Amino acid sequence: MILRYKVSHSQRLALCRAQARFHSTSLHFYQNRQLETYAAKEAQRLSLRQLVFYGRCMSEERLIKNANYVRTELPVRIAHRIRDLQALPYVVVMQEGVTKVYELYWSAFEKYTYLPSAMNSDLTSANLLTRLRRFPRIETLEENERFCTFLQGLLDEHAVVIPNLSLGLTLTSQHLPPDQLDAFMRRMLVSRISRRVLAEHHIALSDSVSSRNRVTSGEDGHVGIIYTGLNVEKSVRRCTALLHQLTHDSEDPWPSGWPGVIIEGHVHAQFAYIKEHLEYIVFELLKNAMQATVTKYGKKSDLPAILVTLVAAPDCIGMRISDQGGGLLSPYIRSPSDLFSFSHVRNASRLEQDRLGPLRTVCASPTGMRATVEELVQRWKDDWPRADDESYMQNNPERKSGVGHRPRLGIGLALCNIFARYFGGSLELVSLDGWGTDVYLRLPKLGTNLEGSEV
């Protein structure tokens, strides 16, 4: 018996449009030999120490040199990722989220790629938008300012990459072996982080040269986006305060709040690192520990505290976060490391509607997802439920305990793992089912590790 499925007119139109977009883009790609040239080049990976040393004594000449490095390096890294996307099975690339990322990457590559004819025209305001598609060599501070504006525009445009990739690969996980899917996502996300680091670091250095950046000294003084004396305890306390602030709002129906956090060990530990990366990891880990604790014990005033142990080893900064939230026991998870996977074959909870719904919402939002603490906090505030929302009080232990309404995209831990590994660190989960979870974070301290090999 042959089963026939009815396809609506709108579905046929959407499929035709998707096929047309993919066909036109891929055809354009194969007709353009510049991508072949850039994809054959090897990315010039950097270390934190190199970024700090070069940016510490910034001058106009050094800034222009850095601008041209970024200008020529970014298209190489984008070309590698376009190649990865082209190597995926057709059915995966045709998924709407993945197709959107493909189009964004191709558009970015076109904007970066230089054509000789661009040198024959100036960069006046009248033709700025046209010439940015083939950004020429930067020679002056004025041209660097325009380049920074260009970089910021691409950063904003690519904010939708993470949720779209996650949604697309989740929905097509059955077409890729889990190891292959996770390796692809790791390459895509490490490369994305590396490009954002290069772009944001250059913008910050440009701000410092033009005296727009006022935070240049003090305990957490920084060079570009790298804080040279990042106080680990201070970051943990900031993340804790933000979480407690979110649960002690005047509209909070659970005035008991979430568990306290006890910090012990080498509480004065400092090292050079990207503050946004560290605090994103810490915020996510503390949030998960607090959610698990409140879910297990409910609305109590004497919830067991989260214990954070800091260790300043000779070559790394270590952190252990211990909770008593019952562990990671779940019918969806066979191993704690499966929580780092983007494949629903390893983590079936990725197909739950309360994960896919918020993920689709973020995909449709022009602000996308930048993976910062400030973004997480704002998303929580925007998603706060009304006290009289009947659906809010459904028979759900997470909702009753005050954590179920939070927007849970299901990719926080996976991103934490990517951030930790970017400069050679590690993240490990140890579940004591029935009791709690210990999370071990290790980040290199010396700054000599190169960026991830997947840049």
Image (spheres, rainbow, N blue to C red):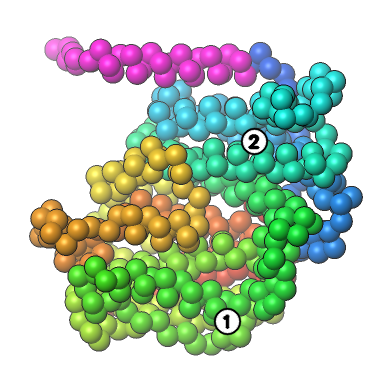
> SS class of the residue under badge 2?
helix
| Residue behind mark 2 | 78
Q: Residue at x 46, y 80 (%)?
A: 308
Q: Earlier in the sequence, mark 2 or mark 1?
A: 2
Query: What percent of the width, then of the height, locates residue 206?
Result: 75, 52
Quadrant for the N terminus in the image: top left
Q: Which residues are magenta?
A: 1-29
Give the amino acid type for the residue marked by disc 2 in the picture: Ile
Structural distance between the alpha carbons of marks 2 and 1: 37 Å
- Pick the residue in front: 298 or 328: 298
Q: Is residue 53 left or right of residue 3?
A: right
- On screen, residue 163 above or below 112: below
Q: Is residue 360 magenta?
A: no
Hey, which residue is sitting farthest right in the picture? Answer: 61
Query: What percent of the width, then of the height, locates residue 441?
Result: 52, 70
Q: Residue at x 24, y 79 (%)?
A: 256
Q: Report if residue 348 is visible in the image.
A: no
Q: Is residue 12 magenta?
A: yes
> Image quadrant of residue 205?
bottom right
Query: What percent of the width, then of the height, locates residue 245?
Result: 36, 72
> Image quadrant of residue 111?
top right
The overriding secondary structure of the stretch rendered in magenta is helix
> SS class of the residue under badge 1?
strand
Q: Residue at x 71, y 58 (%)?
A: 212
Query: What percent of the width, then of the height, locates residue 384?
Result: 27, 58
Mark closer to the observer (2, 1): 2
| Residue behind mark 1 | 311
- Pick the residue in front: 126 or 350: 126
Q: Is residue 425 left or right of residue 120?
A: left
Quadrant for the C terminus in the image: top right
